[in-house]
Image (cartoon, coloured by chain):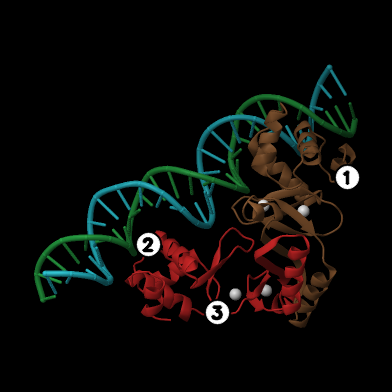
Chain colours: A brown, B red, C cyan, D green
Amino acid sequence: MESGDLKKAGLKVTLPRMKVLEILETSNQRHMSAEEVYRALLESGSEVGLATVYRVLTQFESAGLVSRHNFEGGQSVFELQTGHHHDHMVCVKCGRVEEFTNEAIESEQRKIAEEAGHKLVEHSLVLYIECKDCQKS
Amino acid sequence: MESGDLKKAGLKVTLPRMKVLEILETSNQRHMSAEEVYRALLESGSEVGLATVYRVLTQFESAGLVSRHNFEGGQSVFELQTGHHHDHMVCVKCGRVEEFTNEAIESEQRKIAEEAGHKLVEHSLVLYIECKDCQKS
DNA sequence: ATGATGATGAGAAAGCTTCTCATTAATATA
DNA sequence: TATATTAATGAGAAGCTTTCTCATCATCAT
Ligand SMILES: [Zn+2]
Ligand SMILES: [Zn+2]
Ligand SMILES: [Zn+2]
Ligand SMILES: [Zn+2]
């Protein structure tokens, strides 16, 4: 991801925006809260305000560069848009996030909305799990 | 639903608790935010504090009398437990909520978690729609 | 380089929810 | 029924996440 993507989105290429993108790309967590992005910025020596992080993430979302999820626990989490839709499993013990795709579920959803006479706009599917590792301990 | 259900749940039978139950039973909305329950209580002439409404709803949730959902929009919504699991469609225009069940999706979910080696604890599936009525206007 | 425009940072403020604690109500017992 | 014990309530304060405000600053086109 580079400055061209910001320009295409109609956003000025600024230092804070580049830095936030960089964090999202290089962090070992694909799914991060605004607070986590903020702390990662500080740790990497970038002085970016928390308000700016929120602003920028929201703009990225509108621009389709990032998607936002509301898992349980109060904080929204953000991830770089991958192009292909996917859903999530979240461990209720350790918070680990795993992605999956399932075409059977996707098409069932479309069918359900359609049969009820509604237009499906989007959906949110989260499986809360006790993950492999947390079951051992 | 009556005082016996509260006793069974290990909760004292108090006026505020009875009143909240009554609202949930008699309101024409099955899915209500704490704020909505609170306002309904005031309108019905009951002087119950907002903090109590939150407290009571949370206790009801722990007791399995009520379930809580976090649809988009900040506020949690609550509904009386029906005994059978169901998922929701929420209209992004008017906020109307519809319920559905789909065994194919349910079993697919179990399969996904299991194949990944995880234990499925619970799940949240919300279809955001433009409802039948909102499409007309 | 300059100016116009938009972005930023800091703190204030908003919105939802929980906490605190003095007061009050509900149950158990006599 | 009166009393004692224990838990619940109400009001406001406080917490947490997120957004807003506004003076300052950076970006980009010229
Ligand atoms: Zn885990
Ligand atoms: Zn993801
Ligand atoms: Zn609608
Ligand atoms: Zn429901």
The answer to whether mark 1 is within 8 Å of ligand 2 is: no
Q: CA distance from mark 2 to mark 3?
A: 26 Å
Residue located beneath label 2 in the image: B49
Looking at the image, is mark 2 or mark 1 nearer the viewer? Answer: 2
Q: Is residue B71 above or below residue A137?
A: below
The earlier-in-sequence mark between 2 and 3 is: 2
- Give the residue at x 69% y 68%: B125
- Disc 3 is placed on an element classified as loop
- At mark 2, the secondary structure is loop
At 87% from the left and 37% from the top, the residue drawn is A3
Q: Name the chain under label 3.
A: B
Ligand 4 near label 2 (Cβ, under 8 Å)? no
Relative placement, left or right, of D11 versus D26 is left
Q: Quadrant of residue B43?
A: bottom left
- Position of B96 with respect to A29 (left or right) is left
Q: Residue at x 80, y 36 (%)?
A: A22
The residue type indicated by label 3 comes to Thr
Task: From the image, state whether disc 3 or disc 1 is nearer to you.
Answer: 3
Residue that label 3 marks: B82
Q: Is mark 3 within 8 Å of ligand 4?
A: yes
Which label was assigned to residue A58? none
Which of these two is toward me, B119 or C18? Answer: B119
Pointer 3 and pointer 1 on the same chain: no
Q: Residues within 10 Å of mark 2 (few under 14, many from 20)?
A: few
Q: Chain of mark 1?
A: A
Q: Is residue A62 above or below residue B79?
A: above
A14 w.r.t. B60: above or below: above
Residue D30 is situated, as x and y percent measured from the top left of the image, at: 90, 30
